[in-house]
Amino acid sequence: MHTCHTTLLCRGRLIDLSEPQVMGILNLTPDSFYDGGRHTLPESALRQTEIMLKAGAIFIDAGGASSRPGAEEVPVEAELSRVIPVIEAIVRCFPEAFISVDTWRAEVARAACEAGAGMVNDISAGRFDTAMYETLQTLGVPYVLMHMQGTPQTMQQDPQYQNVVNEVLEFFIGELEKLRSLGIKDIVLDPGFGFGKTVSQNFQLLNNLDVFEKVLGLPVLAGVSRKSMICKVLKISPENALNGTTALHMVALQRGARILRAHDVKEAVETIRLWKYLREVQSPESPESSEPSKS
């Protein structure tokens, strides 16, 4: 069992994860599964960024290519044109914000960090672009390492595991060896809820989320916000999945999640506040222990 590495160095500033934090999702795509098309213009993206920062988000995760199941690959030029102007605008308007770029492309990661991003969130763990790890080595920014079976086009067709928790853990161990050999140490683990897993497998991962930090000593990000693991169980649409998201956020916190990646920042922050209060409050003495001694 390892002691968790609870700080990230992001553009010369330390981010403390000894208490859980929220990463606000900023989708700059027309086809994301929940809020596609809402924030494709810089003005709208800035308004949403302001809302999320005021609500308590520490990170803003900007992405210009949808990774929903079945999503078509976006040309690199389109991804750059969506992401870079928004990151530049966020840096101008909210210079204290920590910006993460959600991309699997090394070229986009580099351009985003040059524009002001300070973290790379890669759904592919370097598999889709072999230049990613070496690019991270030169950028020197924190990296979100995510597990996915297959690709966004194929991942939900028929995911198969003998033991999903063990296989995700083994995957992390192998990738961490590669990253550390390049001197990359600021790493966040994301088990990849909804990325090549059945509903049952997603819940198995959630129920065992604490395994990853205990074994690997790295902070874990939980990305369950409005996902199909909620919608399929409750038979609802993503638009109606806020209550289910909040319920699973509490479970993730109880299982050791350090970052909640969320569409609804206010609600995620409130969940963390309640979790902290629940953890800190003193339990009342039992009637037996409060009885005076008869001796």
Image (cartoon, rainbow, N blue to C red):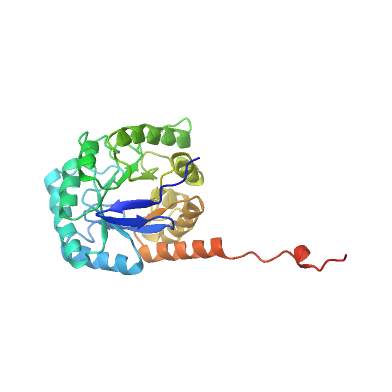
Q: How many labels does the image show?
A: 0
Q: Where, by quadrant of the figure, is residue 213 drawn?
A: top left
- Residue 136 position within the rendered picture, expressed as x and y whole percent measured from the top left: 23, 42
Vertical side of 283 occupied by 230: above or below = above
- Residue 162 position within the rendered picture, expressed as x and y whole percent measured from the top left: 47, 30
Q: Tell me, yes or no, if residue 262 can be seen here.
A: no
Q: Residue at position x 47%, y 37% from top?
A: 165
Q: Where, by quadrant of the figure, is residue 125 drawn?
A: top left
Say whether residue 183 is left or right of residue 234.
left
- Residue 20 position within the rendered picture, expressed as x and y whole percent measured from the top left: 42, 57
Vertical side of 75 occupied by 48: above or below = below
Quadrant the C terminus occupies: bottom right
Q: Tell me, yes or no, if residue 245 can be seen here.
A: yes
- Residue 190 position within the rendered picture, expressed as x and y whole percent measured from the top left: 38, 45
Q: Residue at position x 45%, y 56% from top?
A: 249
Extreme-top residue of the structure: 162
Q: Residue at position x 23%, y 61% from top?
A: 38
